[in-house]
Image (cartoon, rainbow, N blue to C red):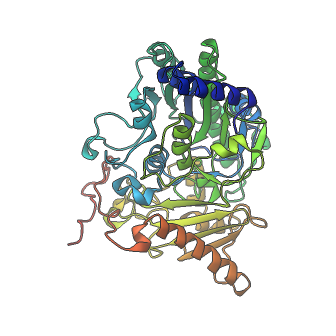
């Protein structure tokens, strides 16, 4: 149910269309919303002021949440850049996307995207900054980034070193200038922030207080970590400022009420036991959506579970387009319209190969189900190093534990891993993991105490394992239903910094 005023308008237009008085082309122009999709790079759920962080300032996110919907249980489909973005574009979990389930791969052209569908329906589609990435398009049969036509002619000096010189908001204005009269648009605004590296000390330089930082329990509470978190939060704020400029550009055109504005991130923050892991710090992301013409009772908090892949069918439904049969994700439009509606009681998350930092370039295949009370993870190859091998010579990035980005926090945890107070945290970040993991979110929100195998939770563990595997079966995950399992053997198109490193040959 849309707003009363908009519903009356749709009814009148429908009657006029049936009578032949109102042409179909005018119906499309009147009823199709614009879409501004804003996605940061590596930002965890908690790191917006609306979501409770005491240090970061995110007025754009807060405004969209206040004037729209704020989601407390939004999860990426994979805590790694390319696969997460592939799932968003296709509306499918990564295990259905072949090579696109790996980072530094390709997104085969046979997989339909919401952007292609909108463009075919007359939308102007474009992007700036980081669209689908990183990887190569040509091996998948694509000549254009699936996020749309790139707009990247404008540059400006960033506020700090290590930030991109792209003038994201200026490029969005160039995109808007290409619009034809009454043409709806779909724009992907993707910043490279808050991806590492960060300029050291920018947190303090901007007046942030290290003592005010909330240090997650998965990290040592040390000044090195606190200042690393501060620097990261400055990059989050840069992304938010770009979004604010883009919103102002739409407002200047008088189209703010009929524009769906989405703010989110591809996955969690670039820290140990976050990015490239299925724990909340890696997979739970901020999500706020604003659409005055399509959201009833704005300002609501949505506690229902969603995956970011649900956005693809949502955008298509908002544009009155059918989703392709391949899209297994479900639209969340009903959450816009009905304050009492629910979507799902769980989110599903997956990993295959991140940066190939194990012998032969192999990944760490795992699947997870996250409910309100529990996180259950199934690790298919527990004999492998989850964060990459400690041996840098087998890693494409030539660093130990290479699935974790280099950082002051990582360096500190590695160099103090045998000291009292740090040893257990380092083991959680870098050590081996069992085949099954189970965490009680109510008593262990940072997921540090694995309960799997305990008799007092065996029924919960079994029920979650069954629920996860039934979902994997229903969506044709080859790790469950059988068939070729090729993620360890697909080409790796990232830069290989170790001499002689290569993916193991595919088995006969």
Task: Pick out the residue farthest to the bottom.
Answer: 455
- Residue situated furthest left in the rendering: 508
Residue 299: percent from left, percent from top: 78, 36
Report the number of numbered marks: 0
- 498 shown above or below 114: below
Q: Residue at 53% across / 54% down in the picture?
A: 77
Residue lying furthest front:
19
The residue that appears at 54% across and 35% down in the rendered structure is 193
Tell me which residue sits at (60%, 13%) in the image. Answer: 253
In which quarter of the view is residue 286 placed? Answer: top right
Classify 237 as above or below 281: above
Q: In this view, does 188 lie above or below 453?
A: above
Q: Which of 323 and 386 is in front in this view?
A: 323
Q: Which residue sits at x=30%, y=41%?
A: 137
Q: Nearer the viewer, residue 459 or 135?
A: 459
* Residue 109 in the image, given as x and y percentages of width and height: 31, 44
Classify the position of the C terminus by image quarter.
bottom left
Residue 206 appears in the picture as rendered: no
Residue 491 seen in the figure = yes
> Foreground residue, 164 or 315?
315
Closest to the observer: 271 or 412? 271
Of the 4 image quadrants, the one containing the N terminus is top right
Q: Position of residue 263 (x, y in %)?
A: 62, 36
Give x and y (percent) for residue 397.
Answer: 38, 52
Left or right, residue 95 beside residue 434? left
Left or right of 163 in this view: 234: right
Query: Is 32 displayed left or right of 3 in the figure?
Result: left
Q: In which quarter of the image is residue 447?
A: bottom right
């Amino acid at each position: 149910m849309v707003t009363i005023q908009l519903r009356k308008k749709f009814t009148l237009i429908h009657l006029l269309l049936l009578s032949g008085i109102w042409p179909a082309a005018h119906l499309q122009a009147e009823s199709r919303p614009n879409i501004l999709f804003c996605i940061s790079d590596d930002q965890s759920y908690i790191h917006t002021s609306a979501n409770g962080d005491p240090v970061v300032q995110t007025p754009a996110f807060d405004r969209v949440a206040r004037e729209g919907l704020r989601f407390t249980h939004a999860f990426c489909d994979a805590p790694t850049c390319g696969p997460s973005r592939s799932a968003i574009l296709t509306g499918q979990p990564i295990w259905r996307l072949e090579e696109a389930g790996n980072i530094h791969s390709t997104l085969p052209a046979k997989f339909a995207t919401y952007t292609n569908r909108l463009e075919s329906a007359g939308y102007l589609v474009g992007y700036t900054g980081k669209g689908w990435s990183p990887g190569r398009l040509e091996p998948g049969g694509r000549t254009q980034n699936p996020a749309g036509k790139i707009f990247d002619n404008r540059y400006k000096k960033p506020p700090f070193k290590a930030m991109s010189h792209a003038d994201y908001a200026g490029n969005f204005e160039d995109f808007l200038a290409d619009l034809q009269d009454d043409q709806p648009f779909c724009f992907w605004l993707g910043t490279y922030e808050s991806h590492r590296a960060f300029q050291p000390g920018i947190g303090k330089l901007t007046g942030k207080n290290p003592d005010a930082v909330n240090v997650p329990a998965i990290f040592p509470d040390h000044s090195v970590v606190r200042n690393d978190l501060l620097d990261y939060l400055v990059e989050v704020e840069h992304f938010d400022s770009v979004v604010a400029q883009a919103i102002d550009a739409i407002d200047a055109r008088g189209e703010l009420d009929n524009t769906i504005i989405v703010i989110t991130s591809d996955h969690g923050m670039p820290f140990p036991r976050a990015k490239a892991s299925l724990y909340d710090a890696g997979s739970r992301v901020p999500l706020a959506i604003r659409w005055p013409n399509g959201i009833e009772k704005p300002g609501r908090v949505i506690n229902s579970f969603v995956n970011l892949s649900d956005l693809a069918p949502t955008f298509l439904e908002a544009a009155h387009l059918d989703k392709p049969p391949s899209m297994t994700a479900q639209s969340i439009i009903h959450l816009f319209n009905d304050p009492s509606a629910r979507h799902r009681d769980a989110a599903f998350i997956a990993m295959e190969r991140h940066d190939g930092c194990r012998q032969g370039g192999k990944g760490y295949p795992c699947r997870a189900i996250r409910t309100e009370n529990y996180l259950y993870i199934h690790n298919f190859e527990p004999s492998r190093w989850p964060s990459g091998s400690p041996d840098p010579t087998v890693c494409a990035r030539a660093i130990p534990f290479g699935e974790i980005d280099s950082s002051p926090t990582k360096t500190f945890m590695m160099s103090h891993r045998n000291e009292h107070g740090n040893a257990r945290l380092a083991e959680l970040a870098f050590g081996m993991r069992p085949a099954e993991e189970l965490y009680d979110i109510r008593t262990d929100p940072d997921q540090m105490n694995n309960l799997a195998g305990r008799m007092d939770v065996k029924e919960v563990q079994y029920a979650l394992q069954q629920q996860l595997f039934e979902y994997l079966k229903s969506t044709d995950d080859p790790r469950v239903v059988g068939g070729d399992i090729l993620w360890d053997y697909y080409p790796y198109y990232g830069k290989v910094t170790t001499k002689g490193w290569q993916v193991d040959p595919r088995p006969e």
